[in-house]
Amino acid sequence: MFRSSVALIVLSLVGCGRQSASPKAPAVDHSSHQEHATPPDDHAGHQGMAGMTGMAASAKFVVDSGGDDLKHGESTTLRFHLERDGKTLREFVLLHERVMHFIVVRDALDEFQHLHPTVADDGLAKVEIAFPTPGKYWLFVDCQAKGEGQQTVRHEMRVAGDSPAVAELKANVPVVVTEAKTKTEVSVQRGEGEWLVTFAHRDLAGKALADLEPYLGAMGHLVVIGAATGEYVHAHAETQSAPDGRVKFAAHIAQPGIYKAWGQFQRNGRVFTVPAVLEVD
Ligand SMILES: [Cu+2]
């Protein structure tokens, strides 16, 4: 069901910025839509690569230890590094306050984790990770090695055992997702060459939230992954504040289909994740 060749092509593109949106818009979008988070020069640099197939192939993900005999429900220390042309990438520019953002999903898109590995001076990265259920997992590392553009490096891992059956994903937006302390209405709208995904947060009594806090340098982070294609998009909130509890993202989704989306936000020092399923055409 998953066409890995498509995903690999998609992931070899690195894109940035709204202006790059087009039918050939880059599918990997760890761009910032906030002015402060990515220096303008840097931003401009990515524009040049956007949409150019074959440019900016992502680095290679190499597992050093902790990747074998994975058992579900047990935590493992995964050690890995990123390599280009046989050389370990050692230095990374901070992106949204971290050297690496590490997204882990099961291929059925029913599991989602957003972790932050540490990276030593020699480029060796380390992350503590637990896989809740057996099955195939996709790992996505968003980073920017010094001297390179932002990139998403992808890797797959298998956790032994019978994968639990999961119902086929069906689009459910607009939808209200109730968390422990919030009710969030998720909606999606077609923009110009992009999809606008809005999360309107309220408290359980229905009052718009006025106390969202920045999470890793943005009012929200959005990860969107294609159910059939594995296409991966990471976008950041359009605005620096959200006094009315509404957080909007522009996601450059290249291929039609069903996508699982996870919005992440912070309130009272606690990060919460709001899932939804979108269909784009
Ligand atoms: Cu992150």
Image (tube, helix red, strand yellow):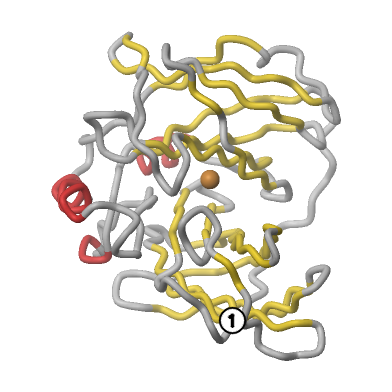
Q: Residues within 10 Å of mark 1 (few under 14, many from 20)?
A: many
Residue 224 rendering spot, x and y as whole percentages: 53, 57
Is the distance from the Cβ of mark 1 to the nearest ligand 1 atom less than 8 Å? Answer: no
Amino acid of disc 1: Gly
Rendered-image quadrant of the C terminus: bottom left
Q: Is residue 212 above or below residue 135?
A: below
Residue at the image point whose x is 61% and y is 63% from the top: 265
Q: Is 83 situated left or right of 174 in this image?
A: left
Above or below residue 51? Residue 199 is below
For the N terminus, give its image quadrant. Answer: top right
Q: Residue 97 versus residue 116: which sits nearer the camera?
A: 97
Q: Is residue 123 left or right of residue 130?
A: left
- In the rendered image, the vertical position of residue 197 relative to residue 5, given as above or below: below
Q: Residue at x 45, y 53 (%)?
A: 233
172 and 125: which is toward the camera: 125
Residue that label 1 marks: 245
Q: Nearer the viewer, residue 233 or 119?
A: 119
Confirm whether residue 114 shows in the render.
yes
Residue 86 point in image, percent of width and height: 32, 9
Image location (x, y in percent) of residue 123: 43, 16
At 56% across and 30% down in the image, what residue appears?
A: 117
User: At numbered mark 1, what does the secondary structure look like: helix, strand or loop?
Assistant: loop
